Image (spheres, helix red, strand yellow):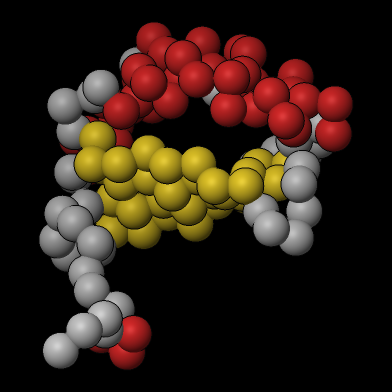
Amino acid sequence: MIFITARFRIRPEDADRWPEISRAFTEATRAEPGNLWFDWSRSLDDPNEYVLVEAFRDDEAGAAHVQSDHFKQAQQDLPAHLVQTPRIVNTTVEGEDWSELGEMAVGP
């Protein structure tokens, strides 16, 4: 799978509304057949930073994502709400789901 983590620094005046601002893009991406997950989290240390964790089934699904109409629309709409260009880590890993963190196993 293609595994991506991106850090978004949001303009302070837009940070509380970021889930609403990015909602159409988020929902459309989650509906893509090759999307495995697309999840936003807000930083505990910086209320103006959101981290996006996303995964796509394979290279084909990743390519379909960046060629989609909703991705192109997000390229037009979202930068106006950002302080800087998002930072990204993009890699290919085996599997199609999260693995258990054995070092913090719960229960017997």
What quarter of the picture does the C terminus occupy? bottom left
Residue under the image location 14 percent in, 61 percent down:
95
The picture places residue 90, in percent across and down from the top left corner, at 42, 54
- 88 to 31, vertically: above or below: below
Q: Report whether 15 appears left or right of 34.
A: right
**Who is closer to the viewer here, 59 or 108?**
108
Residue 57: percent from the left, percent from the top?
18, 43
Residue drawn at x 23%, y 74% as measured from the top left: 100
| Residue 49, position as x, y percentages in the image | 71, 46
Instruction: Please tell me which residue is depicted at 16% across the width and 26% down the height of the picture.
Output: 33
Nearer to us in this view, 105 or 69: 105
Q: Nearer the viewer, residue 33 or 100?
A: 100
In the image, 64: left or right of 78? left
Q: Residue 82: which quarter of the image?
A: top right
Instruction: Using the rendered image of the protein, determine whether residue 72 is visible from the camera's viewpoint.
Output: no
Q: Which of the two residues, 96 or 103, is positioned nearer the viewer here?
A: 103
Residue 70 placement: quadrant: top left
Q: Is residue 12 visible?
A: yes
x 26%, y 84%: residue: 105
Reply above or below: 76 against 39.
Answer: above
